[in-house]
Amino acid sequence: MRIAMVSEHASPLAVLGGVDAGGQNVHVDALARSLAGRGHDVVVHTRRDDPDLPATVEVVPGFVVHHVDAGPPTYVPKDEFGPFLPRFAEELARYWGHWRPDVVHAHFWMSGVVSLLGTERHGIPSAVTFHALGVVKKRHQAEADTSPDVRIPAERQLIARMDRIIATCSDEVRELQRLGGDIGKIDVVPCGVDARAFLPRPSVRSRRPFQILSLGRLVPRKGVGEAVRMMAELPDAELVVAGGPPPEGVDADPEVARLRALAQECGVADRVRFVGAADRDAIPQLVADCDVAVCLPWYEPFGIVPLEIMACGRPLVGSAVGGLLDTVSEGRTGLLVAPRAPSEAAGAVRYLLDDARMRARMGQAARHKVESLYDWDQVAEATEAVYEQILTAQGPKQSVAAGKSVR
């Protein structure tokens, strides 16, 4: 099968940890690799943000990244992509005129928008994974939401015009239905984790004081501030914050400065350490060295970091939002708390710190759940099944431009 993925701002080749580089980059990269490993030809189209990048890069056999020239070849915040979208759409339509995919899978709403011209011109079946919905972001960030005004109307259009919607969790299905989505067009395929790379391993640190890990991007909605506040009620523990800039850039980072000021205000500055972004191969040891991990976002469309922690065999205290409602089995693989409730989070962490046997049982159960449901090979197989369903339901499609069968 020829598969075109569109990920306009989240390149599979990007360095993770920046404001616009995170779970979607991991998702697209891992899914493309796994689909290529299943014998498919995958091209991921992403915007060129560096003039020195080649037009195409073969990542592994069967998986190519295509850099689309649309806008200046430099970093641009994704919420400022609007003026470049028409050029991006034309470039995709032109590309697919020469290399016609069997299915197009757009990732994020802007990828869906730029895909429509080519899919409808050439009669190509389409699917979209939103990764985050504008209505949810607006609900939680209000005036801090920098999304363009066209985002929510565009998402409603995509829900109506795409052949299938691939949601990543059950909470997203409910949101899609509120936006007018037909439940018969929605499939749930979660994000995944490389269960062979993220493995339990022995700790190499002294067991006192207790160590709590917060891992992920340093943006306010990820709830690191709540983790810092929580520490005021956990005097026998320290918090390690991994994420954000490279280690050498931690002291100059404005979000780190804000969180350090908050730690000072809460009287916990001597028990909060910022270690910067961690290489992915270093994450298993970071997790092994903690007693409990926390993921306390205000909202979370899915969340790959919780899966990485679970794969490494540690219990998780997480916000009861979005994808964490599916991934964290309450009382079995971790504990769920209300978002933006640091005292409740502190109580859940305290409960786990006081019972080493429970932590071990939950860690084992978390690893088992990842192996059973969330390995990328399983996610790729489920995604492939959605593609096959689209093709079976569509039958031979007619090219809008040429008026003839293109399959």
Image (cartoon, rainbow, N blue to C red):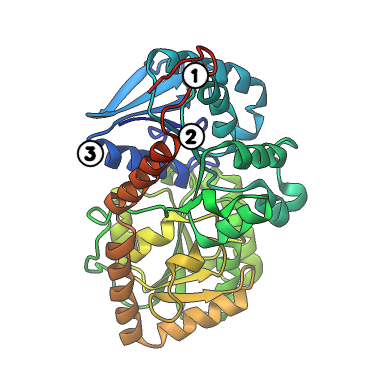
Residue pictured at 57% horizontal, 80% vertical:
233
Residue 348 vertical position relative to residue 227 in the rendered view, above or below: below
Q: Please name the residue that numbered disc 3 is placed on.
A: 37
Residue pictured at 43% horizontal, 43% vertical:
246
Marker disc for residue 222? none
Left or right of residue 327: residue 30 = left
Of residues 310 and 28, the one nearer the viewer is 28
Q: Position of residue 344 (x, y in %)?
A: 59, 79
Left or right of residue 326: residue 371 = left
Q: Position of residue 157 (x, y in %)?
A: 66, 37
Q: Nearer the viewer, mark 2 or mark 1?
A: 1
Sequence-wise, which precedes: disc 3 or disc 2?
3
Residue 248 vertical position relative to residue 374 in the rendered view, above or below: above
How many marks are shown on the rendered structure? 3
Marker disc for residue 126? 2
Sequence-wise, which precedes: disc 2 or disc 1?
2
Of residues 30 and 405, the one nearer the viewer is 405
